[in-house]
Image (cartoon, rainbow, N blue to C red):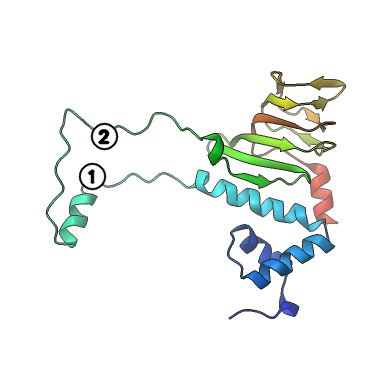
Amino acid sequence: MQMKSENYCFCELAPLYALDMLSESEKAWVEQQLAEFPELSEELAEYQLAVTAIPYSAPQIPMAADLKNRLFARLELDSPPAVPVNNPIVPPEFLAVRAQDLNWRSHRVPGATVAILHIDEIKREIVGLLRAEPGVNYPIHRHAAVEEIYMLSGDLIVGDRVYGAGDYIRSQPSSVHGPYTNGGCMFFFRTSMDDEYPDVAVMAEN
């Protein structure tokens, strides 16, 4: 049963909005709130980033060796042909993501979008691409582990240095910076899931 708009709560609808599970009227209400209160976009971006990570964070569960035979038996079908011993099924040795399949999502930083390529829960590591529009300032943050950035286009200012396409930036654990871009940029990154964003935390508390 759908709620009346006066009973809507952004904190309840935002996660469902990120999952694309709202009705048209509920979507419209969330988008109206974003237009009237731009600060809510940061909260929504957190949910969208979490949704993006869901496919990469699910644990791999090995399939039982006799699962296919048991399924065929339950359906009263002939057993599937056996796979020749000299031609075993080998799992893929690498993961490839085509450019047209990148899933770009809004980032916590207004004017930035991110495409997550891989998440390693054991190493607490996240790998992806980030695009920033001209004038975007990334919040000051402290690195929990090594961060690697490889510039693909545009400019990125870190400290008093400007980096461009082809440049590689490596930040050590516990280092602190707040990079920004003048003309916009896109880069590949590998960083920790546990980086600290003190300014973002203060904004959330207020």
Name above or below for residue 76 compared with residue 55.
below
- Numbered mark located on residue 65 in the image: 1
Most foreground residue, 58 or 105: 105
Q: Is residue 205 left or right of residue 101?
A: right
Give me the C-alpha separation between circle 2 and circle 1.
Answer: 12 Å
Nearer to us in this view, 31 or 171: 31
Using the image as rendered, state which of residue 184 and residue 4 is in the foreground: 184
The correct choice, above or below, for 121 with respect to 71 in the image is above
Count of numbered circles on the image: 2
Q: Amino acid at mark 2?
A: Ile
Circle nearer the N terminus (2, 1): 1
Residue 52, placed above or below residue 86: below
The answer to whether 48 appears left or right of 110 in the picture is left
Quarter placement of the C terminus: bottom right
The x and y percentages for residue 62 are 33, 44
Label 2 vs label 1, nearer the camera: 2
Q: Residues within 10 Å of mark 1 (few under 14, many from 20)?
A: few
Instruction: Give amino acid for label 1.
Output: Ala
Numbered badge on residue 191: none
Tag 1's secondary structure? loop
Residue named by callout 2: 89
